[in-house]
Image (cartoon, coloured by chain):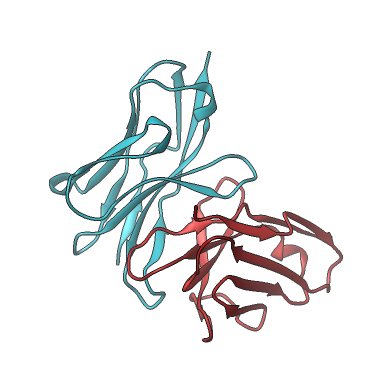
Chain colours: A cyan, B red
Amino acid sequence: AQSVTQPDIHITVSEGASLELRCNYSYGATPYLFWYVQSPGQGLQLLLKYFSGDTLVQGIKGFEAEFKRSQSSFNLRKPSVHWSDAAEYFCAVGANSNSGYALNFGKGTSLLVTP
Amino acid sequence: GAVVSQHPSRVICKSGTSVKIECRSLDFQATTMFWYRQFPKQSLMLMATSNEGSKATYEQGVEKDKFLINHASLTLSTLTVTSAHPEDSSFYICSARGGQGGQPQHFGDGTRLSIL
């Protein structure tokens, strides 16, 4: 069965600093990979997705992620963090199942941005 | 594009009440809709998957008689929590996906359900 691991529960970065959020997955085939962001009390917003092709994908709000098959990773990066980026970030893998390509989410990483 | 509207955003009601939550895809046809439950500081737990015009597929451990799902059209799915009890209090989030396979899911803003 597929699984997603986000090793960091909390991350604190200074505004303007670079950011990398880690995500590792376990899946037998090439997965569909996603990063979502959730603000408090809100739903999830899609940041970016990887299906196939170029392993470096660009998303909204200046985010990018790189798919590394050899490391089973799909880390999210941003070169310069803004205070408005403070939120909960979820990595997810989509895979075919009885639920018809449901998403399997990691436990999330909470990002705090300091002045 | 790909906007999903979820209503209501917050519900507070007495134990024993049934509560209906609506999930609408506003600008696309959702062939599949998903219902998740999220506990505080936790990830999303898939409850069920529904395809338009067919019965929902429930995840293991989710009571289908407790959480009734209807997906009557390509733009609307509803989740009814029947005879709700305090342990049903949670944040419920729907998502919708158009097309097939691994297309991304688009999420509503969630419903905070509080049962007194």
Q: In which quarter of the image is residue A20?
A: top left
Q: Can you give x and y, in whole percent of width and height, for residue A36 in the image?
A: 44, 46
- Identity of the residue drawn at 61% across and 46% down: A42
Instruction: Decide if residue B62 is in sight here.
Output: yes
Residue at the extreme left: A70
Above/below status of A35 relative to B78: above
Above/below status of A24 relative to B108: above
Above/below status of B102 relative to B48: above
Q: How many marks?
A: 0
Q: Can you give x and y, in whole percent of width and height, for residue A94 in the image?
A: 34, 61
- Identity of the residue drawn at 65% across and 45% down: A41
Residue at the extreme bottom: B54
Q: In this view, does B3 lie to the left or right of B15?
A: left
Q: In this view, does B75 lie to the left or right of B12?
A: left
Residue at the extreme right: B14
- Identity of the residue drawn at 84% across and 68% down: B15
Q: Can you give x and y, in whole percent of width and height, for residue B40 in the image?
A: 61, 48
Q: Can you give x and y, in whole percent of width and height, for residue A81 in the image?
A: 43, 22
- Depth check: give the residue in front, A87 or B108: B108
Q: In which quarter of the image is residue B7?
A: bottom right
Instruction: Decide if residue B92 is in sight here.
Output: no
- Identity of the residue drawn at 31% across and 53% down: A33
Q: Is residue B95 left or right of residue A42?
A: left
